[in-house]
Amino acid sequence: MVTVSDAVLDSMLLEFVEECKKKSLQAYNTFGILYYGGFRISEIISLGTLDLNNGTFVMQPRKGNNVRTLSYTDFPLDFRDIIKHSTSVFLFNSVSNAQHFFSNHWKYKTIFHKTKNVSSHLFRHNYAKKLKSQGLTDGQIQLKLGEKQLSSAQNYIYSILKK
């Protein structure tokens, strides 16, 4: 069994986002926001309010109270407009639709260890790992992920993917 490096996972996910651009605007927007923001699919589908201030935005989901503050500049320009307008027209309308698209179009699903359920949640793991490689502390990553418990954030940061 071989461990998938963080760099390899990142390139696989970015390649998937770019492939989505050719297939579906909803997929490209949804998975692009997952890639650049580390959201859960359920968070972006249920976007509540966005407060744009000084180059950051505060995301308040309609359900729950895990408020997240992210830098607006972390996202490429085409995703900033989608976030700014908080419009679901350009996103999948359900978690199951997004997950179904991912399952059908993720070409690397067969290389991962069969006991590991490969899902679009890989984007969240990847985001946490990228933040760690940029020098953020576990506590800072916890805040960016909107996790209440440090141990939950650490599960993303230090997860090991095997193929």
Image (spheres, rainbow, N blue to C red):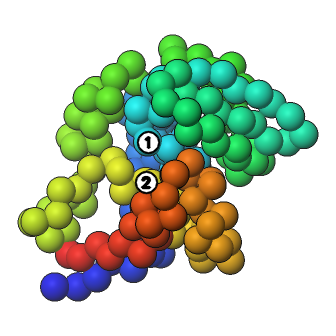
Residue drawn at x 26%, y 29% is 96
Farthest-out residue, left? 114
The mark that comes first in sequence, 1 or 2, is 1
| Left or right: where 59 falls relative to 30 | right
What numbered label is drawn on residue 123?
2
Element marked by disc 2: helix
Residue drawn at x 71%, y 51% is 74
Number of marks drawn: 2
How far separated are the C-alphas under marks 1 and 2?
8 Å
Farthest-out residue, right? 54
User: Toward which corner of the image does residue 113 lie, by quadrant?
Assistant: bottom left
Q: Nearer the viewer, residue 4 or 22?
A: 4
What numbered label is drawn on residue 40?
1
Name the residue type under label 2: Phe
Quarter holding the C terminus?
bottom left
| Left or right: where 74 falls relative to 15 | right
Q: Nearer the viewer, residue 64 or 48?
A: 64
Q: Is residue 111 visible?
A: no
Element marked by disc 1: loop
Residue drawn at x 47%, y 75% is 7
Q: Residues within 10 Å of mark 1 (few under 14, many from 20)?
A: some
Q: Residues within 10 Å of mark 2 (few under 14, many from 20)?
A: many
Across and down, in percent, residue 151 comes to 44, 66
Q: Are marks 1 and 2 in contact (CB under 8 Å)?
A: no
Q: Is residue 33 visible?
A: yes
Residue drawn at x 19%, y 68% is 112
Name the residue type under label 1: Arg
Q: Which is in the foreground here, disc 1 or disc 2?
A: 1
Across and down, in percent, residue 100 comes to 23, 34
Quarter holding the N terminus?
bottom left
